[in-house]
Image (tube, rainbow, N blue to C red):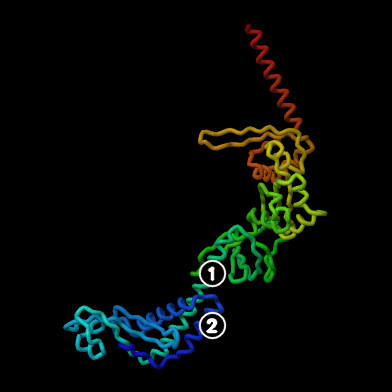
Amino acid sequence: MPRKKNEEEPKDTIVGLVKLLAEERDIDEEEVFQAIESGLVAAYRREFGGNKQDIKSVNAEIDRETGEIYVYKLAEVVDDVVDEANEISIEAANELGYEDVEVGDEIEIGIDVEDLGRLAASAAKNAINQKLRDAESYKIEKEFSGKIGEITSGTIVRKDARNVYVNIGRAEAIVKHDGQIRNNRNEHYDQDRIMKFLVMGVEEANGRPSVVLSRTDARLVTKLFELEVPEIKAGDVIIRSVAREAGSRTKVAVYSKDPDIDAKGSCVGQRGQRVQQIMNELAEEKIDIVDWKEDPALFISEALQPAKVSRVDTEITTNENGEVERYAKVIVPDQQFSLAIGKSGQNVRLAARLTGFKIDIKKESDESVEASKALIDDFTVVDDENKEN
């Protein structure tokens, strides 16, 4: 049976709007049409459902060419109608043009709604807006979920007591408290300032995806070096490890796969221009570049720069829990002790994190005293044993 069409319907408006939005926002046309159809059903139920008509099944269809809308309910064919909202007699079905129906069949009954035009316009508007929000949210989540650990540039939008909000193109992102450099007077989150960030993840906020950024993660330093140093991007120079106290100081261990390429020199750049560019981006955060060494003792000596090291003794053991413990005793000239420790212990702390060793630093004079005492103790023990004999 030909379906009864609702004549008061803005045909071209809906089809044209759907096609235009689908093209501009890169959204599937069919998904938008389906969203509008769902919106029509929801709008009809809000307006005419509930206590007035408890209709179990309402559907809507939009002609993809003409924009004509057909709203209908499914009714079961019965002998005696008890539920008028969901049942229809065989006689009534025949009058509607369904001639070969039997009891138990379901038929479509067009719903006449006087103000369907108003409902349709409202439903279409709401459905399209929601579809645009959903599509945009999906794109944001899909795009940035694949960029976790990558670098992105953004413009500061605003800042409140805890968070910094950043425009990164199609999305507004957030830099949480722990992702902000707060101990550096050169780090400012001023409105309209362009900065680089590390993408940490995507979270839901007020029903929409929010991209979480960081300025403190150590991987940001790695990514900045990849941008600035062609030898790293090409894979000839490798960053083996990074230890960072954001806003203050970072140590980077580098290694060259090509013996003709100076890893440290490549990262520093001519007249220090490459590393200075990175330091400028990180609010003048100090960056130490050291050569990675396969020998732990040599690597620890490098990691403690700018201090000079006299000797490194390393010990690697496994504790009762099966965990590997790495310990290093480092001997430095007395005048190098403060430099090796660093301000508030920062130099040795970063060196330990860079190398993976627990580092105990001792002065040469203290080590000499301890060695002398140990020698005297050993001599005393031997002398006592001789006397007993």
Q: Quarter-wise, where is residue 270 in the image? A: bottom right
The mark total stands at 2
Q: Which residue is mark 2?
A: 20
The correct choice, above or below, for 202 with respect to 68 in the image is: above
Amino acid under disc 1: Lys
Identified at 62% across, 71% down, the residue is: 169
Q: Residue furthest top?
A: 389
* Element under disc 1: helix
> x, y percentage for residue 342?
73, 44
Q: Quarter-wise, where is residue 304 in the image? A: top right
Rate crowding at label 2 as few (under 14), some (14 to 19) or many (20 or more) other CA atoms within 10 Å: some
* Element under disc 2: helix
Q: Residue furthest front?
A: 100
Identified at 70% across, 61% down, the residue is: 187
> x, y percentage for residue 100?
22, 84
The correct choice, above or below, for 362 with respect to 82 in the image is: above
- In the image, 208: left or right of 348? left
Checking the image for residue 332, the label placed there is none
